[in-house]
Amino acid sequence: MPNRSSSALGFSGYESPTESNYNGWPPTDGEVSFPASPAITRSNTPRPDYHPHHPQTQNRHVQVQLHHPQPQRPRFSRLSTANTVITTAGLIEGGNGNGGFRPASLDEAATGGVANVLYSIPYRSKWLTGIGLAFFFLNIILYLINCLMLSLRFWFRPGAFLNSLTDQVESLFISAIIVSAGTILITICQYGVPHVGPWLLRVMEILFWVYVGVSFVVSAALYLTLWSTQIFPIHTMTPVWVFPAYPLLLTAPFAANLISAAVRVAERDGRVGSALGMIDTIAVATAAVAVQGTGFLIAFMICAAFLYRLMTQKLPRDHQRPGVFISIGPSGFTAAGLVSLGNLTPAIFPSPTSSPTTPESIFSATTPVTLPMIARLFSLLAGLWLWGLSVWFFLVSIGSLVKYLRREHRAKLRFQMTWFSFVFPNTALVTATEALGIAFDSAGLKIFGCVLAALIILVWMIVFGKMVVCLWRRELLWPKDDD
């Protein structure tokens, strides 16, 4: 067994595990032992990463259990019809057939996020709308396929759903199914409601309240389940821990796009004034701010723990590095939602002298102090603050990938579904930038947002293409012979 130097185990904490740290570990001789060092020995200090719930430790328990064989579950032959369906489900939603909620659902959220980005670009054109519609329909197709594959897996693998709730990886991504649904609902408000009519607007208002209730209950239930069944060591911490709260972070963008769609429907039907008569804009906006604030505060506290982990344990391991980008989302989505709601304050809090589509200037000395103006002022200040935070996390996330530009490190960053974290959280930064550009009528911010949008689409194409190639070669999300 390889010798571990005292540089990997020190008095100040455990060094962040890397591929080189774990080379040759766990042992393959059927026993688990702890290497001694001049400063730390087995008798006085246990290994900080040795924990029953740690992924590496679970592999070591497998070696110990070889002395006490347990009955194995019967396997289907790959030639059987049942296993063909399970293999297809595994192709989409997992790799080992034991659970179902793998990061595969991130492709839908990323695709819907790109459609949202294209709609947020202030320079409108027919070809841009056409590309956005293509991403919108592709997102729906991917969502339906993933839901079908999940249903098949849970049907052919009894108990797989409950196993997903207590799996250390899959339990964190259960909320991805709600996040993907949220992106679909947002893009329906953008691309569907203004062209269909008031009936779809009322349906979306009902779905908004359903989404608020489901996301609030599910996020609380997921965290309670995690805290009751799992223990996550701090040196394995990544911003993925935020993901159960991600459905809450789409509430304000959903509300802003719902109210904006109501304004557009009112204008199309020739109704003078705001959209207050079509939907309850005040209730929608206040509920969205409350739920969005809850999600952001949960994410902010977890991100604070992530910064502590970075200070004491260095950057995450190579295969966990894409998850660093998830830290961009909480502040980005909150900034985009608050600023967009601020731009819609005349429609939310109508007054006889205000226009539902032209917010009053808060920089004019002659502008009277009104409730819409105060609400817009606070939303812009909070949006600027959080936008700066998302930019900072964006720079940190980009910096964490710099070492992979060197040839000797490039092979360590192998493709997996978490690569879609390069896309989805960054869509929040783009939409927040465009919303601020519209709020301040800043050509610089608008152009900067367009450049970011083009880069996001390019990254999505690279990641999606890489996913298709890996699926075709059966290198990704495919059941292995040794599962």
Image (spheres, rainbow, N blue to C red):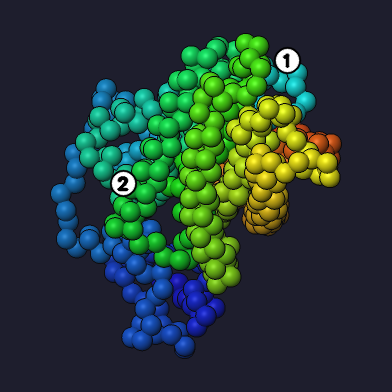
Q: Is residue 103 left or right of residue 415?
A: left
Amino acid of disc 1: Lys
Residue closest to the eye, 207 or 17: 207
Image spot of residue 267 (x, y percent): 66, 16
Residue closest to the eye, 256 or 366: 366
Between tags 1 and 2, which lies in front? Answer: 1
Residue closest to the eye, 432 or 326: 432
N-terminal of the pair, mark 1 or mark 2, is: 1
Image spot of residue 292 (x, y percent): 52, 45
Looking at the rendered structure, the secondary structure element under dot 1 is helix
For disc 2, the neighbor class at 10 Å (few under 14, some 14 to 19, many from 20) is many
Q: Quadrant of the N terminus?
A: bottom left
Which residue is rendered at x = 58% and y = 28% of the image? 259
Which mark, by number, is residue 171? Answer: none
Image spot of residue 369 (x, y percent): 72, 44
Residue that mark 2 sits on: 165
Which residue is rendered at x = 60% and y = 12% of the image? 195
For disc 1, the neighbor class at 10 Å (few under 14, some 14 to 19, many from 20) is few
Residue closest to the eye, 179 or 270: 270
Residue that mark 1 sits on: 126
Q: Is residue 298 above or below residue 255?
A: below
Which residue is rendered at x = 26% and y = 43% of the image? 162
Image spot of residue 401 (x, y percent): 66, 53
